[in-house]
């Protein structure tokens, strides 16, 4: 089936690169329908975009003929992916605030499809606190945001803010659409021996990242988990065809294509989100949940009283989400925990398997720079024994684990 992109071009000197982007997407067999903002039309003409897309180009919210024939809600939902390229500081600000004052932003507010924003702007506009705040908000809302390139700008300044090359944008779009990648990029894709979507029809529930437990309005207890491993597993599960719910603690990562993400902060919120996502065929608990939280988070910032006394903090244990699932009436058929250890890794993992009621524990050695790093050395501990995997990039650990999950689920009844 042809994949469809709704391309929103906003106004900036980089808008001319949208023509090349359309050409590259068409070459990959992706259909493109273009929307121009009023200022983008100063940089590229609807005629050239229309010729390249072989489709009508939409510009005006109140174009009654188009509204009657297609309607902005429909237009926003007919695509598989909505791409804003280039995305100016202005359109990012409007998106982050839910402003719908022209056709482009109305479509962005009305869409239920994944959105990719590809920013391009002057370096100072990029680094401005307002822009960074808007980008943070958009990422938290699940918008995929590509990093701009560094280099010379049309305005004569130098720095970050250049639109990435159209080829890089087209590759990111293809990745988000989960299209087959060019052959030279296939090495990190799982090989499911002819069955490309072995988890089709399955629901996989994943936790990732740290939790943050408030001490007072400005301080919290947390850990160094980056969420990368859990997000890579969610991406691999989605590629394998699963419906994926990813319950994420506070992390700075894009939501992988095809993944339903629920953002939480505390362990108790994570537990509630996990329980409300049940039933699931498999649950993979990758999050580094804080073991303790303060008994009572203070409403006001705690102050030193100058007496040199220890901080007035009482810690209580957080609920164990994995163990709760292990003994839950709706326990997933396959329950997998992670164990971050620095010593006697396999022994601790075996004990954890029993204590938490899990089927597998993925034990990882965190004595190096695994937390935040890109590689992982893991051992899979099950009641049947221990498998030791070589040190691999987190993406490959994810693919191998999902392949193993798919095999395990295929030998169980639905
Ligand atoms: O006990 P420990 O924290 O080492 O266990 C790690 C495993 O248990 C991980 O899978 C982690 O996601 C899960 N866990 C949890 N809830 C907690 C603590 C750990 O789900 N409160």
Image: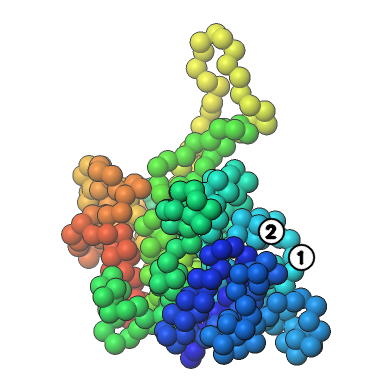
Callout 1 crowding tier (Cα within 10 Å): few <14, some 14–19, many ≥20: few
Number of labels in the image equals 2
Q: Which mark is residue 379?
A: none
Q: Which secondary structure, mark 1?
A: loop
**Identity of the residue drawn at 76% across and 65% down:** 101
Q: Is residue 28 visible?
A: yes
Pointer 1 or 2: first along the chain:
2
From the top left corner, tell me how far across and down residue 177 is, in percent: 47, 77
Dot 1 corresponds to which residue? 101
Question: Which residue occupies the foreground of this view, 283 or 366?
Answer: 366
Are circles 1 and 2 on residues that touch, CB within 8 Å?
A: yes
Q: Which quadrant of the structure image shows residue 192?
A: bottom left
**Identity of the residue drawn at 44% across and 71% down:** 166
**Identity of the residue drawn at 76% across and 76% down:** 61
Q: Which quadrant of the structure image shows residue 409?
A: bottom left
Question: With respect to residue 194, does 90 lie above or below?
Answer: above
CA distance separating discs 1 and 2: 9 Å
From the top left corner, tell me how far across and down residue 237 is, in percent: 40, 71
Callout 2 crowding tier (Cα within 10 Å): few <14, some 14–19, many ≥20: some
Question: Which residue occupies the foreground of this view, 152 or 213?
Answer: 152
Question: With respect to residue 314, does 222 lie above or below?
Answer: below
Q: Which mark is residue 94?
A: 2
């Amino acid at each position: 089936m042809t994949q469809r992109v709704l391309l929103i071009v906003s106004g900036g000197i980089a808008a001319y690169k949208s023509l090349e982007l359309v050409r590259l997407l068409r070459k990959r067999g992706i259909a493109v329908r273009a929307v121009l903002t009023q200022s983008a039309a100063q940089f590229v003409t609807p005629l050239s975009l229309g010729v390249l897309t072989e489709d009508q180009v939409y510009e005006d919210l109140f174009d009654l003929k188009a509204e009657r024939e297609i309607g902005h809600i429909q237009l926003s939902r007919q695509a598989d992916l909505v791409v804003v390229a280039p995305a100016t500081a202005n359109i990012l600000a409007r998106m982050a605030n839910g402003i719908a004052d022209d056709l482009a932003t109305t479509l962005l507010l009305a869409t239920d499809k994944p959105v990719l924003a590809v920013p391009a702007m002057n370096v100072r506009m990029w680094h401005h606190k307002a822009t960074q705040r808007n980008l943070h908000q958009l990422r938290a809302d699940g918008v995929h945001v590509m990093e701009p390139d560094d280099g010379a700008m049309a305005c004569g300044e130098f720095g970050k803010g250049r639109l990435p090359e159209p080829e890089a944008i087209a590759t990111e779009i293809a990745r988000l659409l989960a299209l087959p990648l060019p052959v030279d990029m296939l090495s990190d894709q799982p090989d499911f021996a002819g069955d490309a979507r072995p988890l089709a029809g399955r629901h996989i529930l994943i936790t990732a990242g740290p939790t943050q437990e408030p001490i007072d309005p400005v301080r919290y207890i947390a850990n160094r988990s980056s969420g990368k491993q859990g997000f890579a597993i969610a991406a691999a599960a989605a590629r394998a065809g699963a419906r994926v719910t990813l319950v994420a603690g506070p992390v700075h990562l894009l939501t992988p294509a095809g993944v339903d993400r629920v953002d939480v902060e505390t362990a108790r919120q994570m537990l509630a989100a996990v329980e409300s996502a049940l039933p699931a065929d498999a649950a993979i608990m990758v999050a580094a949940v804080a073991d303790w939280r303060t008994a009572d988070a203070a409403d006001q910032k705690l102050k030193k009283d100058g007496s040199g006394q220890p901080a007035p903090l009482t810690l209580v244990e957080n609920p164990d989400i994995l163990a709760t699932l292990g003994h839950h009436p709706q326990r997933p058929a396959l329950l997998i925990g992670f164990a971050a250890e620095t010593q006697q890794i396999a022994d601790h993992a075996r004990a954890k398997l029993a204590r938490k009621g899990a089927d597998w524990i993925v034990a990882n050695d965190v004595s190096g720079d695994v937390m935040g790093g890109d590689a992982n050395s893991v051992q899979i501990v099950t009641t049947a024994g221990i498998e030791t995997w070589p040190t691999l990039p987190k993406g490959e650990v994810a693919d191998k684990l999902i392949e193993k999950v798919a095999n395990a689920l295929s030998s169980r009844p639905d």
